Each structure stands twice: as C-alpha cells, then as structure tokens.
Amino acid sequence: MLDRSRQGAIRAVTRAAQSSPAYRVLLAEHSLDPSREFSAVDLAKLPVLTKNNTFERFHLDDLTGGVPAADLGDVLTSSGRGGSGFGFRLTSRKQHASAWFDIDLGLQDAFDVDRRPTLLVNCLPMGVVFNSRAVTVANVSVRQDMACSILKDVGPNFEQTILCTDPLFVRQILDHAELVGIDWKALKTSVILGEEVLVEAQRDYIAAKMGIDVDRDPLRMIGSSFGVGELGLNLLFETRETIALRRAMRSRPEVRTLLVGEHGGLAAPSIFCFNPLRTHIEVLNPDADGYGELCFTMLDPNAVIPLPRYTTGDTGKLVSTHATTEAASLCGTPAPWLPVVTLRGRIKDRCPGMPSVEDIKELIYLDHGIADRLTGAFLLTPEGSGRAKVSLLARNEQSTTEAELNAGLGRLVKHLDLKNLTIEVLAAEAFPHRPTIDHERKFPYLRAAGH
C-alpha cells in the first residue's frame, strides 16, 4: 500500500504539471521542466507547497487551470488561523457525488454503521459539513441547544448516536446536556473530536462526563480526527487500536520509546492511522527521533486544485510497521492494520524550553474537579529565560474561590514537574483576549511575548 501510495504521489505531480499553471511556475523555479516525465523523479527534489506560495501568491484560476464554475459542487476553506488569508478546497460535482465514501468507510470501521442505525450530530464550526449514505446527519454547527434537542428527541429512534465536535466546544455541549437531562448511556453516544489536538487527560474527562469506559467499552468510543481545509476531512484518524497504544504510553515507557522516541513532553503525541491509497505522507527535515513537518499529497485524480507535497504546519513522524507491531504486542492489543503517524501538534504552538499547548491541556484536565471550574481556554505566554505564564479562563459560575483553585493548580504543576511556569486564573472580563471564546474560530492558545 505504501509503495502504491508513492506511485500515486508521482502521478499526482504529473497531473498537477499538466493542469495547473501555478504548479508549472513552481516547477520552473526549481529548475524542473514541467513537460518532463516524472515517473522516476525523487519527490524530495520537487517544490514544497505552502499556503503562502499557492493561495496567497496565485489566482485560483492559475491553481485550477480554469475549471468552469458550473462544474463545482462544493467549496471548503481553511480556518484562517494564521491570519494571512484562506486556502480553499474546491470539489467538482463528480467528486461531490462520491464524497460520502471516505466518510462512511471510516464510520463503518469504527462504529459498524452498516448494521447499526446511527444518528450523527455534527457540531463542527466554520461550516464544516459532510455527506453520508450510512448514517443520518444533523449539521447544527456550534449550537449546543440544537444539538442537545436533536439528541434527546430524535436520538432514541436510533441504535447509536455519534457527536462530532471539537475539544473546546464539547464543554458547552456537556454543560447543556446536564442541564436538559440527556442520558448519554441510553443514547449510546460516541464522540469524534477534530479541529485541535485531544490529550488523554481530556479524553478521560469527557469519558467520565458521558459514562464511557474508554479502555473496555466495545461499542462506544471517544476518538480524534485530523483534517485540513485545503486537502480534506479525516486525513488522519484514531482507531481503537491507536487509542489503546497512546493510553498505554502513560504507564509503559518502553511503548512510548518505540512509538515516540527518547524525547518528548508531558503530553503524548497523538497516534493516528491514515489511508495510503488516499494520501501520501512525507516528513520533512526529520530530527533524531524522526519528527519533522508533515507533508501531504492527495492522490485523487479528480482534484480540482492539485497540491502535491503540501505542508500543514504540523509536526509528526511516520512509525514503522515493526515498531507498531512490537508496541501492540507489549500492550496485548491488535496492531493497527493501516500505516501509523504520530502527531505532536502545530509547530508554531511549540516553543523550545517551554511547556507545549498540549502539556497545559493535560494540566487543566488531570483533576476533574479543577477542570469543572475552568472553560478549557487559556493563553500561554513566553516570558523569556525559559519561563512562561499561563492565563486560564474560569467559568463565570465557578464556585471555588480563586485561592483554592490556584492552590490546586499549584499542586498539579509541582506533580507534573512543569518548571518555570506561572499560573493565573482569570474571569472573562480580565482575560487578555477578545473575543474571550468564539467557537466559530480556532482558539489561539499561544500568545506572543509582549502582546
């Protein structure tokens, strides 16, 4: 499969050179003849694409080769998190008609949706929707009241329900569900989380709120998915096997060494599978542990905007089949049947000598009583000389006094050995970010010093 994936990436380069005027310019700038035969080319010698040298440089017609507007069935944008504009994924009507397949393949693998009537409530922000022929989809975006109403009133008609959202907005849903009396167990609800990295302490917190035994429940699960607006949804995804491996790393250092390497922070990297017949993945400029920037080539021959070797700003590494098989054997769990990549998160969210954004998430959710009194939003600010400050946004209705909350967090900081970290808990009116939380946008957890 991996060999076919690489061959598919070469074919994607050839198609891009034939159809995209912008890509031909990029090839020429790398002293490569756009009309040459690419069958034997070394991928590493080809241009690396970014949002800056594609969407911010070229007109869409130059990227697509001038696809007629009437042929387009769908448009999806990037999040705009970088603040420098948007990238786009344009889907032809032909592609749109078959877009359900990749979604349903993943849902069937995880939840057996072909045999179990399933309601999926999609609370992903920014207009992210998807098609399915196997499940009933309710697209409600970031409306916890609508989501809970559908789950409570429509959900009992189905054998199982799935909630698709992000790790920050799920807090709003859980709070409203408690208010209106949703029985997650009766609804047999599982959760798929996207948009940002999910850490194990937060998985534990959500599982406790929803009555899910993450390690033993054969039907319900809390899983994570990784997508890129310009490329597609669910490019990387957790399975029951990868979740078991990641959770084992907390108590089995030998498993962590096999999958992650000798170094790493408090939070374990995400362990994802990917479909190598859909996307080819490279790791650029890997370090001693194999981590570098992830680079994707989508293999769909009908791609409207071909983006060979497109980087996403995320750091990860490809894990060998031998390593995953040996790690699974140590854990007594089946090995993933698809290739595995570990993901540390966004490169811009990791400052040398400082805790990562994911480390702070582990801190917040380790004690569920403390997590109940926080929103999950925070700003991590470098203060120089290896020091950092984290400003945690409190829930407005939190009843624990500030002194008690700070004392509890101080104990966790010491327990987790997060050195040179100053913590403050702030109410919304004092929080140094506006809007405080806008669930339609990705939250900027890392704050530049002096801002």
Image (cartoon, helix red, strand yellow):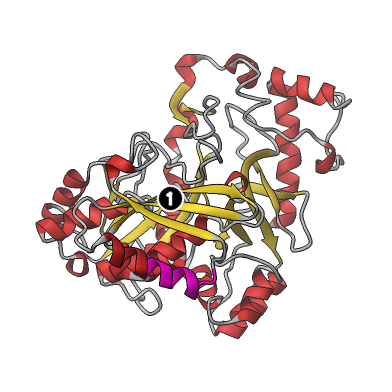
Question: Relative to 251, does residue 283 appear above or below in the rendering?
Answer: above
Residue 125 in the image: state x and y as whole percent.
35, 39
List the residue tagged with mark 1.
Answer: 194
- Number of numbered markers: 1
Question: To which quarter of the image does residue 183 belong?
Answer: bottom left
Q: Is residue 34 left or right of residue 96?
A: right
- Residue in the picture at 68% in, 74% down: 258
Residue 232 in the image: state x and y as whole percent.
51, 40
**409 drawn magenta:** yes
Structural crowding at the residue carrying mark 1, measured as other residues with C-alpha within 10 Å and reported as few (<14), some (14–19) or many (≥20)? many
- The three-letter amino acid code for the residue at tag 1 is Gly
- Residue in the picture at 36% in, 76% down: 218
Magenta extent: 408-417
**355 drawn magenta:** no
- Residue in the picture at 13% in, 55% down: 152
Which residue occupies the foreground of this view, 424 or 219? 424
Residue 221 in the image: state x and y as whole percent.
37, 67
Question: Relative to 316, does residue 77 appear above or below in the rendering?
Answer: above
Which residue occupies the foreground of this view, 287 or 305? 287
> Dominant secondary structure of the magenta stretch?
helix
Where disc 1 sits, the SS reads: loop
